[in-house]
Image (spheres, helix red, strand yellow):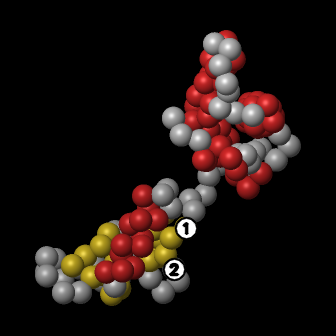
Amino acid sequence: MSLFYAASTGGFYDDTVHGVMPDDAVKITAQLRSQLLAGQSQSLAIIADADGNPVLKRPEMDAEAQANRERMWRDGEIDSVKWLRERHRDELEMSSQTTLTVDQYQALLTYLKRLRDWPQSERFPDEQARPGQPDWIAQQTR
């Protein structure tokens, strides 16, 4: 069994299944196909290089698409941490011991503010300039 990729169709072919393949089909390994499909599932595009071999590339996006992607990321980040703020507020209202320290709570509020302000940032929508999540948040459990 041999696997192939054809730039003209953007498809993968298996010589045990496909009797006829496009003229531009190039032989690839099963490992490469798996890597390509994994990259595609992470929003990367499979394209052919100058020799017709498949490679992964981040698709070009216009400014509006980049801004929309970053707003979606920002909204998801806010949703993923707001439970910490709500739990802390509930603990305060119940006059019970809080899970977060005062410093952690302030850092959480600062992070939420930076997320809300991200679209007005000078570097928006550069994903490399996204607000960084405080390290301790990843250790919290619901």
Give residue 82's position: percent from left, percent from top.
62, 28
Mark 2 vs mark 1, foreground winner is 1
Q: Is 75 displayed left or right of 104 in the figure? A: left
Q: Badge 2 local density, few (<14 within 10 Å), some, or many (20+)?
A: few
The CA span between labels 2 and 1 is 10 Å
The quadrant holding residue 87 is top right
Q: Badge 1 local density, few (<14 within 10 Å), some, or many (20+)?
A: some
Residue 134 in view (yes/no): yes
Give residue 137's position: percent from left, percent from top.
65, 43
Q: Is 47 displayed left or right of 21 in the figure? A: right
Q: Could you say which is closer to the camera, residue 110 or residue 62?
A: 110
Q: Which residue is mark 2?
A: 49
Q: Please report the residue visible at 27 percent of the width from the left and 82 percent of the height from the top.
A: 3
Q: Is 103 displayed left or right of 42 in the figure? A: right
Q: Could you say which is closer to the camera, residue 20 or residue 132?
A: 132
The quadrant holding residue 19 is bottom left
What amino acid is labelled 1 in the image?
Answer: Lys
Question: Compared to 114, does 18 lie above or below?
Answer: below
What amino acid is labelled 2 in the image?
Answer: Asp
Q: Could you say which is closer to the camera, residue 15 or residue 74?
A: 74
| The N terminus: image quadrant | bottom left
Residue lying farthest to the right in this orientation = 122
Question: Compared to 96, does 55 lie above or below?
Answer: below
Q: Which residue is mark 1?
A: 57
Give residue 126's position: percent from left, percent from top.
74, 51
Disc 1 element: strand
Q: Please report the residue visible at 55 percent of the width from the left and 67 percent of the height from the top.
A: 57
Q: Could you say which is closer to the camera, residue 130 or residue 36?
A: 130
Mark 2 and mark 1 lie on one chain; the one further toward the N terminus is 2
